[in-house]
Amino acid sequence: MTGSAGEFVSTAHDSDIVEEIARSRRRAKGSFRVTFTLTWVVLVGILLGSLLLAGKIDGAFIAKWAPYILGGVPITIFVSVTSIALAIILATLGALGRLSRNAVVYGVASFYVSSSAARRSSSSCCSSTSRCPRSGMASRRSRSSPSGSPRSRSTTAPT
């Protein structure tokens, strides 16, 4: 409601509405958490159940190697967090550099962004061969036409 000078005047009804909205948001948040947790429990249960049914879990192996594997968890977490932090910093610097009006800064950022994209696209062992020597799987190039160019995706029937 508004008073005579146009200022907001609260009523008891307004506070009831605000409290109801807050309760509704808490219920929705709790419901989301329960659904999320149950989804994870079901998915992990399906995964473990299928591994157990297929006989793919070797208890002796797990008992023998679990301490060694678990000993590497802190190092793995440290390396992952450090890599993510470094990637965020470099990505932010690259993005800000691409927004710069300074030609040198823009040039360095563009070079960095372009070279990192080129590294990602050529990192596959199968980029220039028709079959991957490690897995024997066909690369994208071998699924194209004999000339090496992608097949046409026309919708017309061949003549």
Image (spheres, grey):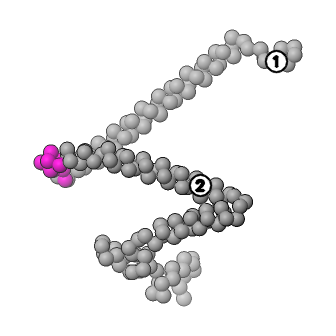
Give residue 74's position: percent from left, percent from top: 32, 44
Which SS does the magenta portion mostly show? helix
Say which of 114 and 17 sits in front: 114
* The disc label shown at residue 94, or none: none
**Relative height, residue 44 to residue 110 (above, below):** above
Distance, label 2 to label 1, CA atoms, is 46 Å
Residue position for label 2? 93
Residue 1 figure quarter: top right
Residue 22 part of the magenta segment: no
- Residue placed furthest toward the top: 12
* The disc label shown at residue 7, or none: 1
Give residue 98's position: percent from left, percent from top: 65, 60
What residue do we see at 42% from left, 32% from top?
34
Residue 64 part of the magenta segment: yes
How would you rate the neighbour count of disc 2 (Cα within 10 Å): few for under 14, some for 14-19, many for 20 or more?
some
What residue do we see at 54% from left, 68% from top?
115
